[in-house]
Amino acid sequence: MSSPLRITHAHGDRITVTDTSGGIDLLSYVYRPESAWEAPKPYLHPLRTPAGNVVTDYRPNDHRWHKGLQMTASHLSGQNLWGGNTYIHGQGYQALPERVGSMAHLGFDEVEAAGGSAVIAERLSWRHHDGTHWADEQRRIELHDVEYADEHGDGSTGTAGSWTLTWSSAITNRRTMPLHFGSPTTHGREAAGYTGLFWRGPRAFRGGQVLGPEGSGPELMGTSAPWLAYSGEHDGADGHATLIFQHAPENDHSGDGGAHPAHWFVRNEPFAAVAPSFAFYDELELAPGNTLARRYRVTVADGAWNRERIAKYLAEHPW
């Protein structure tokens, strides 16, 4: 059973998408600029399950620049559009505010809800710390497939269900020289290939279950697979939630047509985090005027889904 959606736009601040059948705010897209040290950029927080449980964190005390679900660039031609300290090989993480850039909101091309789907289409400018314009981004966020489970086997439903978010970003290099996308791992730190779309889970999700098509747990760090799922148990409410992260098939190619497979960054200790990194082991080079296009999906579901249930859902909801 699908559900109609409603958009509320607090101009200059955020856009909230509400499931009108249950009155649950499924997501808020916050685009007002925040602290320069945290690499100002739009983000999604909170994300909620159809039952109303929050599955993102915001400014945790260990990493203040972790904000829900956001597009990041931890190492970009010497700049840090991730936030906080910058990793320098042999020196660790250093406070280098002159390297911390931003992704600035320019305007919306579409903000609309119709029936069971909603769309937010935005234009952004990626900027050096000094304000120099480095790249343009066309971003499109679509919320769809809001569904409720037949919990009782007789056609009646409860609040448990799922919904899916598709995130598309097209980043065009506006410099006269290449942009180099990297990560702490490309700069010498093992198992820290985070960059690109990044999710930070609630503190209660620490120690959660990580599943892939094959394998489970932290061993999936740095592996390449079409999807990865994370399940955690809530504080303050009974039960679990599962998030399924997918990267689109075309994400295996960089802007210049060369092979560049996505690899998973995932942790369940000391915190819950997932990123389908586009520069885990190797830097990605984007030539002047070229565009790096990426599509991702995140499914937010009530309950702890096993591999079989995840596979069934993905087969029923193909790209």
Image (cartoon, rainbow, N blue to C red):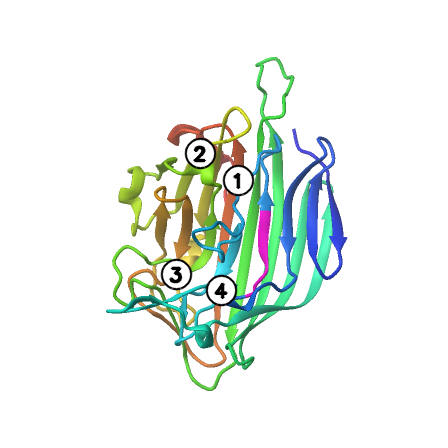
**Can you identify the residue that label 4 sits on?**
293
Quadrant for the N terminus, please: top right
Separation (CA) of disc 3 from disc 1: 24 Å
**Can you identify the residue that label 3 sits on?**
278
Nearer to us of marks 3 and 4 is 3
**What span is colored magenta in the figure?**
40-45
Separation (CA) of disc 2 from disc 3: 25 Å
Crowd band around label 4 with a 10 angstrom C-alpha radius: few (<14), some (14–19), many (20+): some
Which structural element holds mark 1? loop
Cβ–Cβ under 8 Å for marks 1 and 2: yes
| Residue 158 lies in quadrant | top right
Residue 201 x %, y %? 47, 43
Crowd band around label 1 with a 10 angstrom C-alpha radius: few (<14), some (14–19), many (20+): many
Res. 232 mark: 2
Cβ–Cβ under 8 Å for marks 3 and 1: no
| Residue 17 lies in quadrant | top right
Cβ–Cβ under 8 Å for marks 4 and 1: no
Which residue occupies the foreground of this view, 178 or 54? 54
Residue 47 x %, y %? 58, 43
Q: Earlier in the sequence, mark 3 or mark 1?
A: 1
Separation (CA) of disc 4 from disc 2: 30 Å
Q: Residue at x 60, y 63 (%)?
A: 34
**Can you identify the residue that label 1 sits on?**
55
Residue 117 x %, y %? 67, 44
Cβ–Cβ under 8 Å for marks 2 and 3: no
Separation (CA) of disc 4 from disc 1: 26 Å
The answer to whether residue 193 is above or below residue 143 is below
Cβ–Cβ under 8 Å for marks 3 and 4: no
Separation (CA) of disc 1 from disc 2: 9 Å
Q: Amino acid at mark 3?
A: Phe
Q: Amino acid at mark 1?
A: Val
